[in-house]
Amino acid sequence: MISDHEYGVLLVSFSRHSHQQSFVQAFKDHPRIRIIGVADDPDIDPYLKPLNQAWAKKLGVPYIEPIEEAIKHEGVDIVSVGHEIERRSRIAVMAASAGKHLWIDKFIGANLAECDAVVEAVNQAGVKSILPSYVYNSLVRQCHQAVASESLGELIGIHVDIMFNKGLPTPIPDEIRKPFFLPPGRWKFPDIKRELLTVGAYAVGLILGCFDRITEVYGQGDAYFFQEHAKHGAEDFGTLTLVDENGRIGTISAGRIGVGTHGAGGPQQAFLFGTGGTVFIDGTRPRFDTHIRSSILEASYEPSHDDPMQWASSTPSQVIGLFDDPMILALEDFIRALDEDDAPQFTVHHARDHLEILLAGYHAIVQNKPVPLPLDEEAVS
């Protein structure tokens, strides 16, 4: 039987450390989703409250403080958590404990202890959860289809490249370069994001869907293209090697490579190796590539002074994509899971293991040696 139940969504924060604004159109367009309001806490960055209020006005819904009160409003079934990573665990636990389903942007906590708290809260409350950013895009879906087809034979290895051509690379004087440091407790910066975390996460998510349990991680990430990252000692590009319990090897390269370096906004591609063959998948295809002289020569490749790392602005592109919107696919999967009392493809349980792999990668970079999983207790919190 097809359900016609309408689900109310509360949008918690439009932090620039999240993709909340990318979710809005899918929520607005779906006939069974209604946006109830925008919410945040009073003690947030000065830029954020006016931005939250602007979105609430644009959507024609109330702006509510604090989050704890907003979650109690009548009609809220789903809480879409779009805050910075350091705040997400508390919000997710609060929402799950109130019986609300969770739509969370990319990460559920800043460390494994926070992630475990979210998983426990979801388990105890019996609510549904989804992290929509990882398994609904074209590259991941094509890779999963290739593995499932068995045309490769037995899968033995994967290499994934995911890079965003954003920001303007410049020479890096030695005197501004700070030593690379372990990030737990310091993911948030006013001007940059740690790119192995935010971009490499997509590639790790892809490999997680194709491999068995990851047992060892090695990483490199202390070279820089951007002064903004070098000044913080926080990577703008990195690589990881993952080994699963059956000895299969996955490698990734991920990060920022500079504006204007790729026609489709940055390479998103994977090489799959099997006992019966290999396959190369370009996640930006199928597409139309256009090479119009004016669109290339007259494009502005200089990032805005207000957005130097291009968090909120797109890059010049000569590509028209022909693939399905991953947010629409994710929302359909979530509604199906709610209707059928089932689990979506990527839940907080997957997200917990996902962050553990990324944390192991950072430990490996600092220690310059492979790190086994599970992480020891010292690395968890």
Image: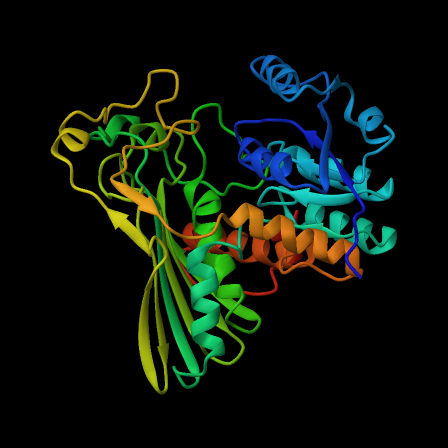
Depth check: give the residue in front, 206 or 226.
206
Taking the spot 57% from the left edge, 52% from the top edge, the residue there is 329
Residue 310, horizontal then vertical, whole percent:
37, 28
Q: Is residue 176 in view? A: yes
Depth check: give the residue in front, 297 or 123.
297
Q: Quadrant of residue 41?
A: top right
Position of the N terminus, as image quadrant, is bottom right
Q: Is 229 drawn above or below residue 47 in the view shown?
A: below
Taking the spot 34% from the left edge, 27% from the top edge, the residue there is 228
Residue 374, horizontal then vertical, whole percent:
61, 64
Depth check: give the residue in front, 209 or 368.
209
Q: Quadrant of residue 229?
A: top left
Q: Is residue 4 left or right of residue 365?
A: right
Residue 177, horizontal then vertical, whole percent:
31, 31
Q: Is residue 223 in view? A: no
Q: Is residue 301 left or right of residue 27?
A: left
How many marks on residues? Answer: 0
Q: Is 380 drawn above or below residue 311 in the view shown?
A: below
Residue 193, horizontal then vertical, whole percent:
45, 34
Q: Is 95 drawn above or below residue 59 in the view shown?
A: below
The colour scheme of the drawn protein is rainbow
